């Protein structure tokens, strides 16, 4: 996909500037949803199946995701590429802006708050974990729960009101 201009912001916006593309990436990254049905039913914003199918195709064509091969009757699994993993700091920055300037529910703001409080080292560790999960990179040792486990636990605790 060739961008309309040579401007790097334009090139990024042409791939990532659509709200559904960013929300699909959010759900793949933070929700570990890697199959069409999980992305469709797990979308709290209610993405339509035709929109989801279109965004997945666009993200694959842009080199953000890969689509695993699936035999007839099997589900294809989507994985982040390194370019997809490199969107984490973009999503992190957008989330921080949203915390500061937009309303939201405590339950859905909890993960972003945890990431902001933990800082850039947490984001880097999360990206390493995504490389293990999506790119089959060798795992790095760390003490305690992984970043995704911490994010999931924080979200579940907020949902339960604890």
Image (cartoon, rainbow, N blue to C red):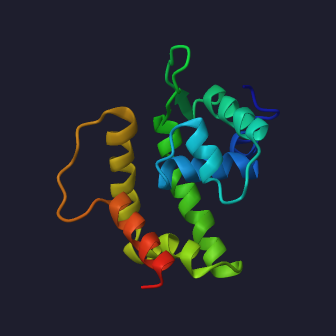
Q: Is residue 107 above or below residue 143?
A: below
Q: Residue at x 49, y 31 (%)?
A: 77
In this view, which residue lies farthest toward the top?
A: 72
Q: Where residue 119 sits in the image (x, y, percent)?
A: 40, 71
Q: Where residue 145 sits in the image (x, y, percent)?
A: 25, 63
Q: Where residue 109 sits in the image (x, y, percent)?
A: 56, 75
Res 153 quadrant in image = bottom left
88 left or right of 101?
left
Q: Residue at x 65, y 34 (%)?
A: 56
145 left or right of 99?
left
Q: Where residue 2 sits in the image (x, y, percent)?
A: 74, 26
Q: Is residue 12 above or below residue 155?
A: above
Q: Is residue 66 visible?
A: yes
Q: Quadrant of the N terminus?
A: top right
126 left or right of 41?
left
In front of the other: 134 or 8: 134
Res 105 quadrant in image = bottom right
Q: Quadrant of the C terminus?
A: bottom left
Q: Residue at x 70, y 79 (%)?
A: 101
Res 6 quadrant in image = top right
Q: Is residue 1 above or below residue 123?
A: above
Q: Residue at x 47, y 44 (%)?
A: 85
Q: Is residue 74 above or below residue 54?
A: above
Q: Is residue 121 visible?
A: no
In this view, which residue lies farthest toward the right?
A: 4
In this view, which residue lies farthest toward the bottom?
A: 162
């Amino acid at each position: 996909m060739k961008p309309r201009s040579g401007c790097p912001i334009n090139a990024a916006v042409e791939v990532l500037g659509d709200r559904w593309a960013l929300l699909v990436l959010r759900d793949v990254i933070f929700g570990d949803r890697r199959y069409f049905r999980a992305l469709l039913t797990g979308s709290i914003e209610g993405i339509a199946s035709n929109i989801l199918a279109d965004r997945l195709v666009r993200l694959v064509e842009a080199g953000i995701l890969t689509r695993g091969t699936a035999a007839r009757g099997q589900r294809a699994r989507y994985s982040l590429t390194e370019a997809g993993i490199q969107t984490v700091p973009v999503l992190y920055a957008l989330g921080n802006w949203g915390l500061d300037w937009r309303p939201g529910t405590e339950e859905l703001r909890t993960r972003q708050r945890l990431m902001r409080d933990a800082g850039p080292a947490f984001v880097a560790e999360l990206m390493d974990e995504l490389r293990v999960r999506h790119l089959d990179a060798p795992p790095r040792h760390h003490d305690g729960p992984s970043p995704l486990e911490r994010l999931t636990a924080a979200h579940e605790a907020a949902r339960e009101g604890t």
